[in-house]
Amino acid sequence: MGYSLNQRGLYKGVVRDPRDRNKKLSPGTLMDGLSEKEIFDILGEDPSNLNR
């Protein structure tokens, strides 16, 4: 199980087809109320590195 990020927010518990990683078997659950910083902390990314 993993994460999925789109314009609506961060979803946890996403399950993807191991043969076709673009196909979601389970869409997961939206994690409500997260700030942009909290999302990047969960994903283990430093937002300052994304603009390079």
Image: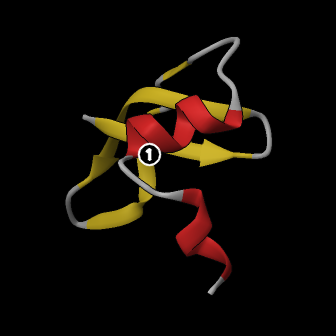
Residue 39 shows up from this direction: yes
- On screen, residue 21 versus residue 33, left or right, reads left
Residue visible at 46% across and 25% down in the picture: 28
Residue found at the far bottom of this picture: 52
- On screen, residue 24 versus residue 31, left or right, reads left
Image coordinates for residue 37, horizontal then vertical, percent? 61, 37
**Kind of residue at badge 1:** Lys
Q: How many marks?
A: 1
Q: Nearer the viewer, residue 33 or 25?
A: 33
Picture quadrant where residue 36 is located = top right
Q: Is residue 29 above or below residue 18?
A: above
Residue found at the far right of this picture: 7
Return the residue at label 1.
24
Which quadrant: the C terminus?
A: bottom right
Which quadrant: the N terminus?
A: top left
Q: Residues within 10 Å of mark 1 (few under 14, many from 20)?
A: some
Picture quadrant where residue 33 is located = top right
Image coordinates for residue 4, horizontal then vertical, percent? 50, 44
Q: Is residue 41 above or below residue 11?
A: below
